[in-house]
Image (cartoon, coloured by chain):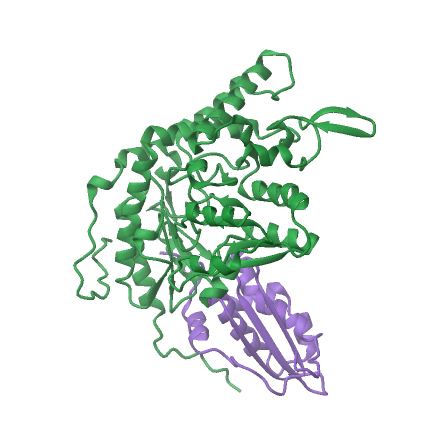
Chain colours: A green, B purple
Amino acid sequence: MSATETLTESRGKPPAAIDPSKLLPVTLREDFPILQQTVHGDRPLVFLDNAASTQRPRQVIEVLRRVYERDYANVHRGIHTLSERSTEQYEEAREKVREFIGAQHLREIIFTSGTTGSINLVARSWGDANVKAGDEILVTTMEHHSNLVPWQQLAQRTGAVIKHIPITDDGLLVLDAMDSLLTDRTKIVAVASVSNVLGTINPVAQIARRAHEAGAVVLVDAAQSVPHLSTNVRQLGADFLAFSGHKLLGPTGIGVLYGREELLEAMPPFLGGGSMINRVWPDRFTPAELPAKFEAGTPPIAPAIALGAAIDYLKLIGLDAVARHEHELVRYAYERLQEVEGLSILGPAPEHRAGLVSFTLAQPHAHDVAQLLDEQGIAVRAGHHCTWPLHDRLGIAASTRASFYLYNTPAEVDLLVDVVGRIRDRFRPRGRQRRRRSQ
Amino acid sequence: MPSEEEELYQEHILDHYEDPFHRGQLPTATHAHEENNPLCGDVVRVELQLGDDGTIKDCYFDGQGCVISQASASMLLEAMHGKTLEDVKSFSAEDMLKLYGARLTPNRQKCCLLSWKVLQSAVHSPVGRDGK
C-alpha cells in the first residue's frame, strides 16, 4: 500500500512536501531494537505514541544491564565497592540533568518518580507551607491532569481558589487575560511548556516574567518539552520545573524536579523516611541537606543512571537537530492530514507547535480510529489524554493523537494519513439499517 | 485481514451504530441511570419505563463514545425491550459479550459492558420528581 493509493480530497494546494535536509538519518532507528518488529502479522510497527512514552535506544538498555549486572547496590549507604560505584553513577546522572536543563546548582536537582511525583511534591511541600484560604493558583485550560489535580487537592486542603488562563479556539493561551487573572493573591502559576494535546509551545518565559511581577512563583510542567526542545531553567525563569525520564528515551519510574535553591531550602520535607534525615531521635528528626531532603527511601537508582545515558544519547544527536526533525514531521503531518475530508486538527498552526498533532473525525470515535490504526501497525493515543477540561473547552469527547520523536519518518506520516483516510471512508454514513426483529 | 470473529466492526454492528434502536429520550421514564468510562470518556444513559407487571415497557439510550459502546447499547436495549426485570437481572456480562459477537480485548470489553452496567443500575434507580 502506498501513500498515494487512496487519494483524499485535494483542495487546490500544492502537495505537501518534506525537506530531507531537516531530517535526522533514518539509520538511527537501528539503535532502537523495539522498532524492528512487526505487529498483527506482517505490519511494521509505526510508533506514534511518543507523547505518552518513548522507546529506548540500545545505549540506554545497555547501561541498565551494566548497572544490574556489575555495579548495582544501594546508594549513599554502604561502605563497599558496589555501593560506591552506584552512588558515583547516580550522582553523575544528577550532574548530567543539571547541565541538560541549565540549572546552577546540583542541589537544585531532585530525582522523583516522574512529572506527577515532582508536581505533587511541590503542591504538598511548598503549597501547604505557602498557600492559605483565599489565595489563588493560576493554571491554564490546557493543563494535563497531573498539573491540575494536585492544585485542586491543594485548594481543597487550604481553601485556595483555582483560576485558568483561557485558550483561543486554535489552542493558544490568551496572555492578555493574565492582566486581570494575576492578583496580589496569586501564589503560583503552573503551566505546561508544551501542551500534550494541542502541541502548543507556550511562551513560558513571558508568563514567568508577568507572574514574578505579581509576586507569584512559577512551576513549569516540562514533560512534553525537555525531551524535544532545549531547555534552560534560568532563561525560562522557572522556579520549579518537572519532567519524566520515560518520555526522554529513559526508563519509567524516574523523573526530575528542578527547584530554585532558596525555595527548596525553605520548603519542609515531603515524604519522610531514610536518606532524607540528618539526625533522628525517638520523637523528632532534623532533615538532610538538599537534594537528599526530598529523596526519602531508596531512590530509582538504575533508572536515574539510565536517564543520564538517555541524556548523553540525545546530546550526541543534538537537541536542535531533534527539534528540527520533529518540526518537519509535524508540519508535514499537519498539511497532509488536512487532505482528509471531515478531519479537524486541534491546536495551532505548525509554527507554534511541537512534534505532535491531535485530530478528530466526524465518524468514527477516536477509539475506533486508534483500533483500526493499530490493525495496520500504527500506535497512536486516543481519548481525552488526561486533559478532560481541555476537551470540554473544545466541545469534544475525545481525540486521536500522533506524536513524533527522533526515530519517526515521513513514510510513517504517509501511512498514517493513508489509513486515516480509509477509516473515514469506511465509516462514512451510508444509510445502513439494522435488521428489524420479527415481532 | 482479521478473521470474521476477530473483526471488531462486523456489518451488523455497524448497522446498529448508524441505525440504532431507540436512541434518544424517554419522557415517560420511571427509571434512569448514566455512567461514563473514566479511561476514555464514553458516556451512556439509559432510560426505562417499567410496567406494573414487572416488564420493560419501553427503553431508550443516549450517549457518546466509540462504535463498540454505542452499538452495544443499541443491541442490548433491543434485546431487553419487553423483557421482565428478572430477565434483565439474569442477563450476565458474559451474555452481553456473546450478544455483541465480535471478540474483544479486555480494554474494549469495558466499552461493550458500559451500557450493560448502566442498565443493571438503571432498574434500581427510580426517576426523582426533579426528573433526574
- The furthest residue to the right: A282
Left or right? Give the position of A307 relative to A78.
left
In the image, residue A110 above or below residue A41: above
Q: Percent from the top left, x then y, of residue A156?
A: 68, 55
Query: Image quadrant of residue B46?
Result: bottom right
Image mark count? 0
Q: In the image shown, does B103 or B57 lie closer to the viewer?
A: B57
Residue at the spot x=43%, y=57% of the render? Answer: A175
Determine whether B20 is above or below A307 in the image: below
- The answer to which image quadrant residue B97 occupies is bottom right
Left or right of residue B117, residue A51 in this image: left
Residue that appears at 52% across and 59% down: A181
Q: Nearer the viewer, residue B42 or A352?
A: A352
Quarter where residue B56 is shown:
bottom right
At a point 34% along the width and 76% down the height, the residue shown is A430
Q: Position of residue A433 (x, y in %)?
A: 41, 79
Name the residue: 42% across, 34% down: A56
Q: Position of residue B128 (x, y in %)?
A: 70, 81
Residue B17 to residue A177: above or below:
below
Nearest the viewer among A92 and A204 is A204
Asked if residue B103 can be seen in this view, the reply is no
Whether A248 is drawn above or below A282: the answer is below
